[in-house]
Amino acid sequence: MTKHTKIDLGAAAPAFEQKNGNPGSPDDVKTIIANLGRAFEEFRTRNDKELAEVKAGMKAAPADLDKLQTALSDLQEAKDKIELSLKAQAKKHEEELIALEAKLNRPGARGNNGPEIDFEAEAEKMTNHVLSMKRAHNLPIPTETFNVDSVKAYKSAMLKAMRRGIQSLNGDEQKALLAGSDPDGGFLITPDVSGRIVTRVYETSPIRQLVSQVTISTDALEGVNDFEEAGGLVMVGEQTAPTETTTPKIGKWRIAVHEGYVEPKATQQLLEDSSVDMEAWLARKVADKISRGQNNLFINGNGVGRPMGLFAYTTAETSDDTRAWGVFEHVKTGVNGNFATSNPADVFFDLIGKFKDFYLANARFFTRREVVTLVRKFKESTTGQYLWQPGLQVGQPQTILTYPVVIGQDIPGLGTNGNSLAFGDFAEAYTIVDRLGMTTIRDNLTAKPFIKFYTRVRFGGGALNFEAVKFIRFAA
């Protein structure tokens, strides 16, 4: 009986040990393969010899055959371990490369035009922004808020839509893109992203903070004016026949909705290759341009295909009792383009004295910065107290004669016969009508290689109460 030698694969076994749960290094893998090769060659040589002896008429003991089968099983197990280890290592490296590439390509990534995005802060900003837009447009306040996952989904969908078009988005991406939007298609506006692009600051007039705002579903807002009274009480004798008294008349007012748009464009390559957060930048620029354009129209619009601006209405010196409805009242300073040289503060007392008490409860001044600069020097002629007072606490506005002052640089400048200062209850006097939020159409066909973003709004504005606001007219 030939003595069979046990084939020991133990030399290869240590190579399969993984420290800290991680696959071995490339050198470890090479050692494993080398050990397996030597073990297999030894096994093959001895096995061939044993087979030759069997053919020569010698029988192998059953125990030796069992040892041979065990060695083959150990060899297959070793091969399986190596294959699994190599696959795990390859998958790990692939995932790391994908993550690294995504991080480097992400707009605003570290070393790629700015610090990493703080998604928790972005979620808070976007939630606050949507809530403010809903309140500004008198829309229902949503119960859901943005979180890190929804912000990431929103930004990814917006960037993909800008690069490839809305049609490239799947259902989940379209849903993410509409997060926080109004039913008409979109406050597709992310909060301000600072520190990424240097942007020029343009001044505007916060008239929406002062006036009334209504969101409608038709092409105009209409209502009824009830200005007249019934005829007065008439006393009659016992046998005197009564005569007809005056019947009050009812009028009608209407604020029409108009359409406006902006259409910025960018090249396809810029959208595809830019490392800047184009979504936030373009959305912010579009929203800012539309907002400033609307604010100017609410102040200076002539009413022809656009809102009638508050400062564009006719004014007169006549009082509320005798002045025609549709005309505001003004008080003159006595000097063209400036205040009077002597007792310039008196015009403010004259102006306030023209109002009914009802309108003074929510009254404020609305004027340009240059006018406030002049008023800061004025004192009351009797007490010597300054008319203007600064806001000494955070959130407290500057005041003139205790009434808040709001700055609007769209208001007409100082000049002869200019109405550069208004005072009163603006929420009673003027109403802004919004028909749609901002809706955007991506056009990649009509101006190749540029992609145009046609963004439109429908809105209107007009005065409803001509007693609630009055003006200071800089005229002799």
Image (spheres, grey):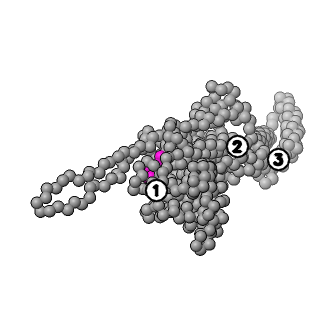
Nearer-the-camera pick, 80 or 180: 180
Q: Which residue is mark 1?
A: 468
Instruction: Say what secondary structure mark 1 lies in.
Output: loop
Residue depicted at 51% across the width and 60% down the height:
351
Residue depicted at 22% across the width and 60% down the height:
234
Q: Earlier in the sequence, mark 3 or mark 1?
A: 3
Numbered mark located on residue 277 in the image: 2
Give the quarter of the image for residue 365: bottom right
Check disc 1 and give the amino acid type: Ala
Nearer-the-camera pick, 205 or 186: 205
Between the residue at mark 2 and the residue at mark 3, the CA separation in whole angstroms equals: 41 Å
Nearer-the-camera pick, 213 or 271: 213
Residue 178 colored in magenta in the image? no
Between the residue at mark 3 and the residue at mark 1, the CA separation in whole angstroms equals: 82 Å
Instruction: Say what secondary structure mark 2 lies in.
Output: loop
Residue 444 visible, this orientation: yes
Decide: few, some or many residues near mark 3? Use Cα within 10 Å; few <14, some 14-19, many ≥20: some
Check disc 3 and give the amino acid type: Gly
Numbered mark located on residue 250 in the image: none
Residue depicted at 54% across the width and 56% down the height:
332
**Span colored in magenta:** 462-469
